[in-house]
Amino acid sequence: MTSAHLVTPEFEQALKRACLRAVARAARHDPLRGGDATAVLHGPLISEIADEADLSLPQARRRLQALQRDGKVIRDDRRGGSTAWWLVGLAGDQAPSATVKQAAPVTMTLSAATPAQKASIDGLRQALTPARQHWSDVLGVPRDCSTSEMREAWAQALAAVNENDLDAEQQRRRINEARSQRETEDGMSEYE
């Protein structure tokens, strides 16, 4: 079987998500500072990739080896026999914040940034500092709405979560916490 048939776009997306999660865990070490060469040092292990892609370890290993033969991934063999993997070029795609820091002094304002830089900065803010919002802001309803309006907004908000987002699970948790906060304020249980 050729690598084109073995490696699907879904697997590559799962690998990308696993890489980004691994980098997020190592954010204090600035894993993207040296591009792919330093990012691979903090890359995901095969078990994380297999979990993300919903594959067995041997299936994930075969796909990673096929990608390595094609020059699409690099690996870092660690002490103890574990191996970290990284998609080639992903560090450059994910490091616009580094180019913003290097290209402009710290005094750069958000209004002077390009739209791509603004999106990158907004994304970093959302990823690093969780927004504390009132339950009504999360669900998009007025604070004095009825219980049925709140529950309808809760259902719509859950349905609107994009499963391909890296933080889809966090979004769902935040939406459910908003509903729980409202029900606690009203002295209700979730079963009423």
Image (cartoon, grey):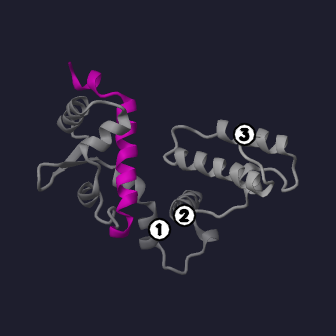
Give above or below for 125 relative to 181.
below
Q: Which residue occupies the foreground of this view, 135 or 70?
A: 135
- Cα separation, mark 1 vs mark 2, equals 9 Å
Q: Which residue occupies the foreground of this view, 146 or 164?
A: 146
| Discs 2, 3 touching: Cβ within 8 Å | no
Give amino acid for label 3. Tyr
| Discs 1, 2 touching: Cβ within 8 Å | yes
Give amino acid for label 1. Val
Residue underneath mark 1: 100
Seen at 40% across and 44% down, the residue is 17
Element type where label 2 sits in the image: helix
Q: Main secondary structure of the magenta part?
A: helix
> Where in the figure is residue 88, as x and y percent of width and height?
28, 47
> Where in the figure is residue 155, as x and y percent of width and height?
71, 38
* Magenta residues (range): 1-29
Residue underneath mark 3: 191
> Where in the figure is residue 151, as x and y percent of width and height?
77, 41
* Quadrant placement of the N terminus: top left
| Discs 3, 1 touching: Cβ within 8 Å | no
Camera-near label (2 vs 3) is 3
Residue underneath mark 2: 121
